[in-house]
Structures are given as C-alpha cells and as structure tokens.
C-alpha cells in the first residue's frame, strides 16, 4: 500500500500502521481504558442522518468560516498534538505547511517538537498555540511570552488533563517512563529501519517549548501520561484560566469543555471559543462524545462564544453534521496524524485534499452553497 492508494482517513491509518514501529502507531491510535469514548466519538455521527435539499444552484460552494476571529478557507482545522517528529522527521513543519495550503488553522502543542519561533517563521496560516499549565509558573509564562513575540493568533488552554489518561496500549508496548519495550516492540523497531534511519539521522528530537526554558539536563518524562502527572498544575481553576486569558490578550479558547456549566464559565471569563472535546478519548473513558454533547452546549452558549466540535471526525459528512447542529468549525488530530506518519507533508496535504473534496461534494449534495445555509432542518436524529 502506498500514498496513491489512500483516499480517506481510514486508508491513511492503514498506511501509518505499516510504516511506524508498533509502539509509535499505538501511541497515536490508542486511547484510555476500554477505548469506548474513543470509538463513540466517531460512532456518534451515525445517530443522525442528513436531510438534503435539491435544485438550489450549487455550482459554486464557499466553505469559508470565521472562528475566534480567524478567517479560514474550510471549516475544519488541525488540533494540536504532541511529539510529531516521532511520526515523521518534519513533524509540525510538515503539518503547518499543509494547513497553509488549505488556508486553515494550525495548532501547535506545548509538547511540539518544532519551536514556536520556527513555526512562526515558516508557516503562514493562522496559528494556535496549545497551552498546558505547568507547576513551574515561569515556564507557562515563558511559553505565552514567546507566542506573543512570535505573533501567534490564538491560545488554546487544554483543561482535560489534570492527570494522564490510562492508555493501556502504551503500557503494553512499553511507551513509558522509563521505556520498557517488550521483545515484540523491539522486533517492530528492527522491522522499520526507514523510520529508525529518519528518526536518528534526519532530525534532532527535542521539545523546544520546554527545553528553551528548563535547565539543561532537566529530565522530562517520555510518557505523556507521566508528564501530565508530574509537570502539570493540578490546582488550576477558572480564576487562573481568566488570568491567563487576560495576560494573553488575544483570542483565547478553552479546549476540553464537555458540560454546559463549563461552557457558561468560559463565556464568563471572556474566552472567544470552546473546543467541545474529550481529548480524542485519551483521558476519561466513559465520557460523552463531543458530537453527542454539542447541541446542548450550542443551545446554551452558541450566541455568545464560538463552539468547535473536536474529535471523531473522519469524513466530510461528520463536519456537515456538526455544523448543522451549530458548531462554527470542527477540528481533529488523528485525521492528519495518520497521514503525517504515512507520508509527511505530502501525506497531510493529500488527507486534507480528500477531506476538502468530500466537503465540497457533500455540500453540493446537501444543496448548500455556504456553511451558513446548514441548519438543524438538515438533520434528523434516529
Ligand atoms: C492529542 N491531543 C492533544 N491535545 C492537546 O491539547 N495537546 C496535546 O499535546 C495533544 N496531543 C495529542 C497527541 C495525539 C497522538 C493525539 C491523537 C491527540 C488531542 C487532540 O488535540 C484532539 O483533541 C484529538 O486528537 C481529537 O480527536 P481525534 O480527531 O484524534 O479523533
């Protein structure tokens, strides 16, 4: 299987599985506990059906939207994800450049492997920085200051990680701190020499958002769950979030809101947007899916704040369903991570091009010329 055989997210997943050593693939693909929430995030879209209209003159379709003040050419953007140079040696640069080709928002993680400054220099599309609040207050401030200096457009504070989720696939493969690779994992690394060559000889793996501030030699846990447990500030509350939003001073998003109460609090602290998200099912297994939870959140705060549906998106029709319910945009992680692992920037561009083509085609089939025309009349729940 090669890039030319990939036509949808599921094909990219298959190719990523082939090209990555299994511990790395399962780090992307896995989720918490029994992975019920992870599966439900996508299944939720099957609980309803689209109701199209016809004869509406759909020769020209406009997919653009404005979300948290950013004008995007398509209503789907790239959620921040950690450690991208593990998946492909170009990491975040490949993803950012692909986002630029499609005029959409690119999210850089606190745990990104390319620096804030390099992304700012080389990626010319709206940029979001995803903030984790560290126990070391100086580190958190340092990240915000660097984003200000680098002219990032949006800050997203992730709030669903006071502790690490229980990602059992990582325990099984030994993707832990310290690493405990099993014989099977070691064999898998040996069977992927191209990945190993690229990892060791075509890049220097770093966490520049952290390493630029931390003293040389400070050890950072390699398992993300251990990183959450040891480095993040579990005492964070809404007052702290408000202070951070003020300190940032530009559009601020709370990422990981699932309840109406929290959505209202996000409005109260002056956030420009919320990402309705359960971290792709990687944190609290058994929590509701973003799409299942979307309508009640839109009904409560949709007039006051931009609501983004994050997670589970694998098809253009998933995006159209969320927009019909009232989301301003959708976002996703694995939908581009599989493609990054499969073929770097060319892979991400192809994945976005497939999703873009699906969106245009599906909008025409729905009888809609622009996304404002999508509404609840276009959906029926079973
Ligand atoms: C993530 N996600 C994430 N979120 C975040 O706020 N900071 C981060 O560093 C990461 N890292 C990360 C790594 C990997 C491998 C995955 C799969 C996800 C969550 C991400 O932003 C987004 O919420 C989910 O990916 C959405 O679910 P889907 O689209 O992957 O189904």
Image: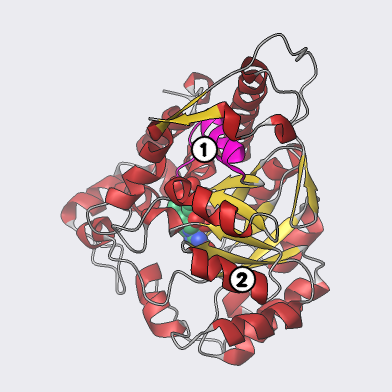
Q: Label 2: state its secondary structure.
A: helix
Q: Which of the 4 quarters of the picture holds residue 372? A: top right
Q: Is residue 21 visible?
A: no
Of callouts 1 and 2, the N-terminal one:
2
| Residue at x 64% of width, y 54% of height | 302
State yes or no: residue 322 in magenta. yes
- Kindly report the secondary structure that dominates the magenta region of the rendered protein: helix
Q: Residue furthest left?
A: 183
Q: Position of residue 103 (x, y in %)?
A: 76, 41
Q: Label 1: state its secondary structure.
A: helix
| Residue at x 49% of width, y 40% of height | 313
The relative height of residue 300 versus residue 49 in the rendered view (above or below) is below
Q: What distance separates the C-alpha of mark 1 from that of mark 2?
A: 33 Å
Pair 1/2: label in front:
2
User: What stretch of residues is rendered in magenta?
Assistant: 312-326
Q: Position of residue 178 (x, y in %)?
A: 29, 74
Apparent side of residue 15 relative to residue 208 in the rendered image (left or right): left
Q: Position of residue 78 (x, y in %)?
A: 61, 48
Residue position for label 1: 339
Residue position for label 2: 266
Q: Position of residue 153 (x, y in %)?
A: 78, 62
| Residue at x 62% of width, y 34% of height | 352
Observer-nearest of 332 and 58: 58
* Disc 2 Cβ-to-ligand 1 distance below 8 Å: no
């Amino acid at each position: 299987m090669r890039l030319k055989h990939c036509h949808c997210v599921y094909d990219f997943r298959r190719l990523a599985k082939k090209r990555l050593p299994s511990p790395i693939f399962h780090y992307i693909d896995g989720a918490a506990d029994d992975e019920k929430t992870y599966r439900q995030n996508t299944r939720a879209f099957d609980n309803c059906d689209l109701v199209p209209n016809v004869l509406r003159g759909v020769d020209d379709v406009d997919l653009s939207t404005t979300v948290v003040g950013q004008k995007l050419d398509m209503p789907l953007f790239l959620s921040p994800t950690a450690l991208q140079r593990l998946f492909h040696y170009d990491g975040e640069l490949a993803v950012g450049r692909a986002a630029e080709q499609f005029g959409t928002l690119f999210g850089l993680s606190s745990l990104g492997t390319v620096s804030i400054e390099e992304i700012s220099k080389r990626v010319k599309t709206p940029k979001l920085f995803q903030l984790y609040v560290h126990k070391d207050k100086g580190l958190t401030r340092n990240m915000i200051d660097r984003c200000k200096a680098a002219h990032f457009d949006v800050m997203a504070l992730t709030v669903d990680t006071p502790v690490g989720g229980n990602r059992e696939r990582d325990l099984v493969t030994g993707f832990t701190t310290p690493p405990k690779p099993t014989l099977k994992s070691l064999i898998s690394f040996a069977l992927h020499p191209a990945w190993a060559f690229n990892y060791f000889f075509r890049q220097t793996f770093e966490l520049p958002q952290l390493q630029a501030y931390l003293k040389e030699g400070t050890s950072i846990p390699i398992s993300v769950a251990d990183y959450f447990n040891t480095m993040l500030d579990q005492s964070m509350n809404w007052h702290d979030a408000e202070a951070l939003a003020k300190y940032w001073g530009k559009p601020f998003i709370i990422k990981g809101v699932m309840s109406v109460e929290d959505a209202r609090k996000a409005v109260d602290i002056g956030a420009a947007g919320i990402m309705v998200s359960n971290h792709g099912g990687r944190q609290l297994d058994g929590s509701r899916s973003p799409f299942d939870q979307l309508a009640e959140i839109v009904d409560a705060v949709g007039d006051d704040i931009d609501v983004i549906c994050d997670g589970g998106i694998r098809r253009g029709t998933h995006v159209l369903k969320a927009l019909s319910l009232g989301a301003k945009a959708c976002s996703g992680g694995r939908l581009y991570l599989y493609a990054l692992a499969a073929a770097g920037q060319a892979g991400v561009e192809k994945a976005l091009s497939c999703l873009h083509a699906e969106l245009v085609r599906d909008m025409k089939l729905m009888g809609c010329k622009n996304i404002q025309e999508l509404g609840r009349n276009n959906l029926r729940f079973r």
